Image (tube, helix red, strand yellow):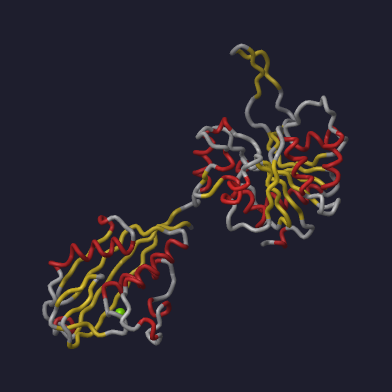
Amino acid sequence: MHAETNHMGFSAIIVAAGAGSRAGAGQAKQWRGLAGRPVLAWSVRALLEAGAARVVVVIPAGDEAVAAKALAGLLGWTATPGGATRAKSVVAGLAALADQPANSIVLVHDAARPFVDAAHVAALTQALEGADGAIPALPVADTLKRGQDGVVSATVSRDGLWRAQTPQAFRLAALSEAYAAWPAGGGEPTDDAAVMEAAGGRIALAPGDPRLMKLTYPEDFAMAERLAAPAAQTTRIGQGFDAHRFGPGDHLWLCGVRIDHDRTLIGHSDADAGLHALTDALLGAIGEGDIGDHFPPSDPQWKGADSGVFLRHAADLVRARGGRIANVDVTLICERPKVKPHRAAMRARLAELLDLPLDRVSVKATTTEAMGFTGREEGLAAQAVAAVEIGE
Ligand code: MG
């Protein structure tokens, strides 16, 4: 919670009671997925993070279970059934906030505008000071035409014209009174400011934002998906190196594959140098230290451990950061055992552990021409690189 962005406190009503049939896909648009979560969840989360004390979502009657699933994991919201019109739904939302102080701020927002954020809320609550309402609004940039039967009948001056967006900010009791005063034959208000204006209220214009666009048509969702994607992806590289000593035994583990051999590799875990080097490469790509930080050799639970656990942990950390492993490449350095007969199995095992297609996984092998500790067969070494695509 970022309570400092709004010291006055506020509550919010999110109107999500429409059928939204113009957006296509045969599903009310508030429940449709947008970059992995329902449209409604975007603004509920954003308003809670901006400091909302309460968020009331006004939903179609009978959709309570759908809302609970869509907003699972978020705390601080309640759902209330809406009415036949937007205005009736807002009135239902106001009734659900009857326990809030009369002079407290209420924001009324359309569920179909998912990209509201704390900066919008701060601008609106500031603009509300000295006014009866505050709305985000953008000046009209396009030339306006009046048309009839497919032809222009007039060019309309855009001077002083604004496009009203949501959320719109009011005092709770004042907005309730304005709705109560809305004349029965007054038609359908298309926003809440119109209701407050009709009651004689003064509405302040706060800066609008193209990101507060309303998702109405199928093509709006395509644009929203692009907006929801991380602004920029960058590729990060990590590298790892490991070596283990040979000792008496009859098999060893390399890149998650058991290989019969006349010696084994000595280590606290299963001593799989290939998996250890690759784990360090992934940790290195995201700046998460090394394998010893995450799995201390002093911890008895890792004695004899399957090193696949270490690699999976590193891959999970990459995914938790919103990253995606682009490719990995492991080089094993030894005279014996001969790696080539096991390379296909090693690649397949790494691809399985990392949940990657095979063409993103490489295993290579080399000797050191009988030089050095690997040449004398005192031990075996492995090095690895990993590329990770991650948001800035
Ligand atoms: Mg090691």
Up-down: is 355 above or below 240? above
Residue extending farthest to the front is 62
* Quadrant the N terminus occupies: bottom right
- Can residue 368 be seen by looking at this rendering? no
- Placement of 259 over or under 392, stated as above or below: below
Residue at (17, 88) in percent of width and height: 248
Q: Ligand 1 falls in which quarter?
A: bottom left
Left or right of 156: which side holds 372? left
- In the image, 59 versus 318, the foreground residue is 59
The image shows residue 320, relative to residue 148, as above or below, that is below
In percent of the image, x 77 and y 60: which residue is there? 7
x and y percent of residue 185 in the render?
Answer: 82, 24
- For the residue pair 120 and 30, the one nearer the viewer reads as 30
Task: Between residue 181 and residue 240, name the one nearer to us.
Answer: 181
Quarter of the figure with residue 220: top right
Q: Kindly indicate the quadrant of the structure image that contains residue 308.
A: bottom left
Residue 232 percent location from the top left of the image: 47, 52
Residue drawn at x 86%, y 44% is 174
Image label count: 0
- Rendered location of residue 113, percent (x, y): 62, 42
Camera-nearest residue between 79 and 6 = 79
Left or right: where 113 falls relative to 268: right
Residue 367 in view, yes or no? yes
Residue 204, image x, y percentages: 79, 41
Residue 378, by quadrant, is bottom left
